[in-house]
Image: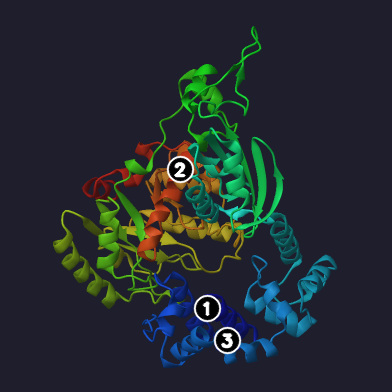
Amino acid sequence: MARVFNEIADMLEISGELVYKAVAYRRVADAVERWPNDVAQLFQADEPPKIPGAGPALTAKLAELATTGELGYYDRMRAQVPSGLLEILKIPGVGPRTVKQLHDELGIDSVDALRAAAEGGTLRGLKGLSARTEENILAAMARLASRGTRLLLHDADALMTGLVEQLRDVRGVGAIEAAGSLRRRKATIGDLDLLAATDDPARLIRALDSLTTVEHVLSAGTDKSSIVLAEGPQVDLMVCPPAGLSLSEKGFKVVESGELEPIATEEEVYERLGLPWIPPEMREDSGEIQAALAGTLPAVVSLADLRGDTHVHSDWTDGVDSIEVMARAARDLGHAWMVLTDHSPSLGITRGLSLERVAEQRQEIGRVNAELAPFRILHGTEMEIRADATLDYPDDLLAGFDVVVASVHTARGQSTEQLTRRTLAAIDNPNVDIVAHPTGRIVNRRDPIALDWPRVFEAAARTGTALELNGSPRLDLDDALARAAGQAGVRLTLASDAHRTEELDQLRYAVSVARRAWLTPGQVLGTRTADELLELVG
């Protein structure tokens, strides 16, 4: 349902309709996608949810789509807009307005036609487009093609969790867990690797091969099986005896006797190699072995170190759940506090808060804090850094927030210098405490913007402004930039960017990035109490 409404918004913009119509559909699509229950089932049960932004007309369309599986308005739009234009929209950096311009002025109606035009240098003749535009489009196409079937970490996690749940109770299995790049918490995952200790390898391999989610079996041996799931990725299962979780599937070989020396635990493997244990997230051949041998390997931050979440939304803007519901869910996760960071006005799709609504929200936070004490909601904002490098709220209003988070969502096509200038404008403002998702990337969906990172890191370290590691599918900053920021003396913060209660768990993905970046608890804002955080950012 969310996909259909987003495609309608795309087609409205391509058709040159008024922008507010497309914004309305996108707002509803976002709410439907984030809704905690199955929206279609609610409509089918004659219990239609009150979707934010959905008036009578859009609610009727949701009902039609939910109950019939079809939407006449969508079908009519698809008949008017060439399908190839929607495919072009999947190319990072190419928006609906550009697609309309390409179609109207050059007759481009497919990805292949766009590639030919870019390679032939014909795009630079259009207003607002240049040789650099052609280079960017071709590069984006190449990146899109190279992504192949790599899974977002979050999706790979869900698939692996399902596999482990189905296999852990197979008779003879002593232990089973993820290995490879998923265990190292890389942002994208190619194949899924499973390692199991069992005294009945054949039984476990048969159980894997016979799962209903298996599309076909590539190979099935006595100690290894490779299958392909219907969802796409390959799964490689390696099995060994219960005492054989070791350097290789066969164990350590004793040179003198030629016998195998089974090792029971991973820590013992490292001890056998003369190394301190290295956390999986750090195993990337980036100096961790040398640091371990030298005794300088840092004790990296863990989820248990965090006391709160610095980026959470509610239904006051583009979230799904109320402030109180979000706060209770955060408290139930063991958090002591959370920063409520609903949006500022200029990001229209989010229903950003006016000055009057900011004051009303502050009163609601006070009411909820009185009920949930000692848990504490800190009143924050996620404020837009405008295209002209000005901020969306005046300084006197910003001074009244507990925590101010600034971010770039719009005009991402500006030059590196312009984007850097906007980011520095926020960092240099004494009221701004955090810059959220600094590159604006969404893994597998949207490429990062380019900033002059040495200047950004210098300014952030000088002013004490924190840079965010966002645990949503953005995974932004990435681990390389986060490590560089930490080495430059920049404060970092880990956040879920949750828009509903279920997304509060995304904080653990920010922790994964932080661990890959070698960050310690002292470098991360969220390890403080609420009072310590306020003192630090104040």
> In the rendering, at what x and y percent does residue 21 appear?
51, 87
Specify few, some or many for label 3: CA neighbours under 10 Å numbering under 14, 14-19, or 20 or more: some
Disc 1 marks a residue whose amino acid type is Met
Quarter location, residue 70: bottom right
Q: Is residue 113 left or right of residue 177?
A: right
Quarter location, residue 532: top left
Above or below, comparing residue 411 to residue 245 in the picture? below
Q: Is residue 130 left or right of residue 278?
A: right
Of the numbered discs in the image, which one, if any, rests on residue 514? 2
Q: Secondary structure at mark 2?
A: helix
Quarter location, residue 19: bottom right
> Answer yes or no: do the residues labelled 3 and 2 have beta carbons within 8 Å?
no
> Mark 1 = which residue?
1
Residue 103 in view of the camera: yes
- Whichever of callouts 1 and 2 sits on the residue coming sooner in the sequence is 1
Q: Secondary structure at mark 1?
A: loop
Specify few, some or many for label 1: CA neighbours under 10 Å numbering under 14, 14-19, or 20 or more: some
> Mark 3 = which residue?
70
> In the rendering, at what x and y percent does residue 278 appear?
49, 29
Of the numbered discs in the image, which one, if any, rests on residue 178? none
